[in-house]
Amino acid sequence: MKAHLLYPAADFDFTAELPADHADLIQDLELGTLLTAMAGGDKFRRDVSTRVLLTSVADEAVIRYRQQILADCIANPDVIRQMYDIAVGALRDKRGVWGFFSSRNPSTILSGAVNQLDVLVARLRQLRRLADEHAGSVRSAGLTALFSSLQRDLDDEYFETIAGHLRQLRFRDGVPISAQLDRDNSGIKYVLRSGSTRRGWKERVGIEPRSVYSFTLHPRDEAGAQALADLTARGINLVANAAARSADHVTSYFTMLQAELGFYVSCLSLHDELTARGVPVTFPVPGGNPPADNPPAGNPPAGPELTCADLRDTSLALRIDRVVGNDADADGRPLVVITGASSGGKSTFLRSVGVAQLMLQAGMFVTARAFRSGLCRQVFTHFIREEDASMVSGRLDEELTRMSRIADHLGPDCMMLFNESFAATNEQEGSEIGRQVVRALLQAGIRVCFVTHQFDFADSFRRERPDHTLFLRAPRQPDGQRTFRLEVAEPLPTSFGQDIYDRIGGWLGEGEQAPTG
Amino acid sequence: MTAERTDPGVLAPQPAFTSLLSAEPDGALPGVDTADQEFVSDLNLDQVIAAVAGDREQRELISRVLHRRVRDTGTLRYRHEIFRDLANPDLLAAVDVFGGRMRDVRVHVRELAKMRSAQQQQGWFLDAAAIYCDAVGALAASLTTLPIASRGLLAFRDYLTSYAESAAFARLAADTAACKKELGQVSYLVRIRGPRVEVSRYDGEPDYSAEIEETFARFAQGEANDYRVPYRVWPGMTGVGAQIVELVARLFPAEFGALALFCRNHAGFVDAVVDRFDRELQFYLAYLGYIRPLQAAGLRFCYPELAAGGKDIFAEDTFDIALAAKLTAAHSAIVTNEFHLAGPERVIVVSGPNQGGKTTFARTFGQLHHLVAVGCPVPGSAARLFLCDQILTHFEREEDIANQTGKLEDDLLRIQRTLLAATPASIVIMNEIFASTTLSDARFLGGKVLAKVVADDVLCVYVTFVDELAAYGPSVVSMASTVVPDNPAERTYKVVRKPADGLAYALAIAAKHGVTYEQLTRRLNP
């Protein structure tokens, strides 16, 4: 039995390795805040959310499949949460029953397994009841299939069979074990048999009853009792194994259910919090991602699609009120270069693109009024690292090492976000390195967003490939205030560092005047 | 119940075969024991012998044979022939399987005495007989079909063939098979109700574990754990087990009656000649087992020419067998070396950079001359070796450097004893003996040692840091350890025949650091 809530016909592999650069991605895109909101204080949900968010899906059908389930969840939040609670409860109940995992005694394993099956089966009954009550209120393909599978596979007859086994596994009528002769005539191949010999006789009418020889241990024969217990243990070894594996099977089902539902319950928490903060939320549209230099026939723009309206950085919107949204239309432009005033919202926009792309490809909603982007294979980030500022001499070295490591994993159809990269050296060198890197990436069919203050670098793309590049700029208002809203504008040759310089009073400081005349 | 030769039904053919280790008619082990001699540990042969013998059942015999130096070329060739036959992997596999089975038989028979249940003893005895029959039958078949050329194996093949075809052995085999088959079909059911145990014939009741797992299989999300408690060791025959099998014997009277009769009819089924062959064979299997990983790593072994009289000796692609075992186990490459002595040449003076393989070379030379004398294939692609009367070694003792004066005196006394003991038929290996003395002492004493060994016409390897000793005269050959020209820190572990030249190494190190005259001239005048 499967839940298949994340893929139409497959499990989500929660044990798969996260993308090679996931730690960088979490740090650079500040995903921590987003994941905290999703987790609602639950470590398990945080882990599940992290894995789904970072495992980008590039299949439009899967994304729509998840979006429909999530829409169902938003419409029926209580049903989803109840179901999740049943799975969580089943696993909690099971942990409460004394387990058997490390026992060296099959009898102990068997009784532990039967006790666990008892509590797990009770939760299976709850699941079935929930499916009976709410099967009519869901619309998505995923949840409809899940509910009907519960009703079909957990029918009444099945519950009766289980109850019969759980009774018989207590062995009130003795333990029948078959055996054969080992090379020294001692017993081997002990196998527990079902049914009783007495019933067997009655059924075999007219056949001579078989001989039964017997002996009874002396009550004080402790060694004999021990040997008998050992024989029993060996005899029930396989059944204990089967029962314990059965308990594991049911547990694994609830574990899987908890994980897949956990993602949607986490999305519900995030949705609640964003809505409460008045942040606009919408389901994004998976767009096309054709290579820029091979335009298909017809009107659609060559190159990847990327358009947004009122796009906000989700993590920032969870931390502070009145976050500014950005509009952009980069359809057909695989390179977006963002320049402009320091602290003008460049990094925030870069992060908002990255986070929205991840949420899109996880099947989630995004914080925007509209977002449409071509699906990519994986998102990579290369951000300036504040903590590296002290060790200036090794910084370029560290940056290039990181770039080289990323390049080990980069490939066509990836998206790469740079934030003030290759600025750890002088502008001439940094620009040249940056140009060479970006040219190589674009050549390889990788989408690039690059925040830079290096004019030489930015301007070279204006000269070389204006049609394939979108230039955004963080403007400086006449009064020196920042709007945090980016404009479509080409890079300016002057640095906006001057306004900072002015604000701090220049090199001479506030109390001094430049000489006149 | 024993397995000694008391079976009146088996009339053993008269064996022409006596021993795999000795060509002598009485089969006595030839040679001189060297177990307490210094060279064994100096050359790391103690490690080799311990590793070859390992924890094999016949480790004492193997170790004894590997310690006994033989100068009789007849015996050595007798062993070489057997080793050559065993180079055929099919034959080797056949005798290896045979040896394992015979060991099992002996273990079984030893264990019979400890068993108290009659049914258990009988079953175990039958099992020993079954293993023995398999061993003999399979080996006889292999020996008749596989090519054999050695005198030892040919003689044994004749013996084994007639033994395996004897009527007595045929009856043993037939009775064993019949008993095994019947007991193998016995299947019974034990029902345990508290202290009461009921035993009946098994009647096809289904396996309950399969039913259980099938019921819950629909929830499986992947591979489930295995909760079977691993019972590697079966309890054997407990008191309860003995009571049960007694009842099983009553449920199956025909099967167990036949078993008791078998035991009475076939007491003492192991043949003494077959038994001796098996024990002595272990020497060959052990040595081949030791060198197999080395061969797999690309190292060569050869049957050396036996130079009993002359001292024109050589070895090509040879190596330290103890070091090779270690390096091969660690998947490291092994460097091979070679040496040739011809005409008046008797002494190899080895010099060159430290850690460059000088000591290893000296050990290799000594090991070869021991391994040739125990009749084993030796490291190398080709070799002619001297059958010496003794190997005398003198290796620097690293521990007691504190008292230099006393140490030098002790050293000289030891060297004196060594040189006095040496005969023209001996081999002497001296390794860095004056490393902790002054250069002039080392030069002077070394010269004296060389003068003595040359005068005595002794084959000698002399490892030293004193260059000029290498140019002693026509009896002395100079060999040196070498470095990679571009990277003097890296050793090649090649010891090659060339004039001693310590300066080459010093210049290479200078070049690596860019401080040779030429380099410094260029760097200072760009």
Image: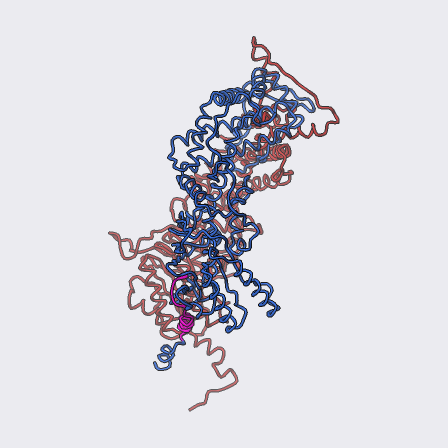
Q: Can residue A310 be seen in this view?
A: no
Q: Colour scheme in the image? A: by chain
Task: Give residue B91's position: percent from left, percent from top.
Answer: 41, 36
| Residue A85 counted in the magenta span | no
Query: Relative to residue B459, is residue A293 drawn left or right?
Result: left
Location of residue B259 in the rendering, given as x and y in whole percent from the top left corner: 57, 20
> Is residue A322 in view from this perspective?
yes
Q: In this view, does A292 lie above or below A146?
A: below
Residue A120 in the image: state x and y as whole percent: 59, 35
As rendered, which of A229 and B400 lies closer to the eye?
B400
Residue A419, quarter of picture = bottom left
Q: What stretch is highlighted in magenta?
A: B493-514
Q: Nearer the viewer, residue B350 or B344?
A: B344
Q: Residue at image x 48%, y 77%?
A: A503
The quarter of the picture where residue A449 lies is: bottom left
How many marks the image carries: the answer is 0
Q: Is residue B497 magenta?
A: yes
Colour blue belongs to chain: B
Q: Which chain is red?
A: A
